[in-house]
Image: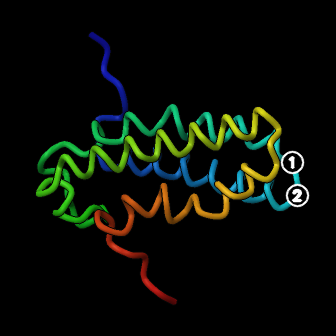
Amino acid sequence: MSKMGSGDVVADRQRLMKSIGANWADIQAKAKAGNIEGIAVNAENISLYAPHIPMYFPEGSGTEKSKAKPEIWQKWPEFQAAAKNLETQSGKLRDAAKAKNEQATQDIVKDFGRNACGTCHTPFRVPPARS
């Protein structure tokens, strides 16, 4: 059986989340530019990454270099549901973009941060420091 990842689960999950974040940034830029069809590939990437999120959070992997809150492991079913929600919401976005439905795509993009990313970041991630 081959080993996946670097062996440093925190570094691996940070790479995964940065990739999701980069896809989200591309989606926002494409939405602003009116490149609705172009959003589909980024939404598909997020949809494919989302089901893998829980495996990057094994019990005991909360460290000082991680922004993961202990609530992840205390409320594991809710955490898994948040990852599933991200998969579902990004799938809806992908489908609207592939259908070239500009209004539906823009509506989903407008609320995606709150309805998809926020369902995990708000309860399970330490907020970034304010500068």
Instruction: Identify which residue is drawn at 35% across, 50% down.
Output: 82
The residues tagged by marks 1 and 2 sit, at their Cα atoms, a distance apart of 6 Å
User: Could you tell me which secondary element the residue under label 1 belongs to?
Assistant: loop
Q: For the residues labelled 1 and 2, say whether their Cβ atoms are less than 8 Å apart.
A: yes
Horizontally, residue 26 falls left or right of residue 15, namely right
Q: Is residue 88 something that shows in the picture?
A: yes
Q: Position of residue 11 (x, y in %)?
A: 37, 48
Horizontally, residue 66 falls left or right of residue 42, namely left
Determine which quarter of the picture holds residue 93.
top right
Residue type at mark 2? Ala
Q: How many numbered marks does the figure carry? A: 2
User: Could you tell me which secondary element the residue under label 2 belongs to?
Assistant: helix
Q: Position of residue 48 (x, y in %)?
A: 51, 31
Q: Position of residue 21 (x, y in %)?
A: 56, 54
Q: Position of residue 57 (x, y in %)?
A: 25, 46
Asked whether 93 or 16 is in front, the reply is 93
> Does residue 22 sit above or below 128 in this rendering?
above
Asked whether 28 or 127 is in front, the reply is 28
> Does residue 76 sit above or below 44 in this rendering?
below
> Does residue 102 sit above or below 63 in this rendering?
above
Name the disc covering residue 33, or none.
2
Horizontally, residue 30 falls left or right of residue 120, namely right
Judging by the rendered image, the residue that carries numbered circle 1 is: 35
Residue lying farthest to the bottom in this orientation: 131
Horizontally, residue 81 falls left or right of residue 90, namely left
Q: Is residue 8 something that shows in the picture?
A: no
> Does residue 44 sit above or below 68 in this rendering?
above
Instruction: Identify which residue is drawn at 75% across, 40% down.
Output: 97
Instruction: Identify which residue is drawn at 39% across, 64% down.
Output: 121
How crowded pointer 2 is (Cα within 10 Å; few <14, some 14-19, many 20+) is rated as: few
Name the disc covering residue 101, or none.
none
Residue type at mark 1? Asn
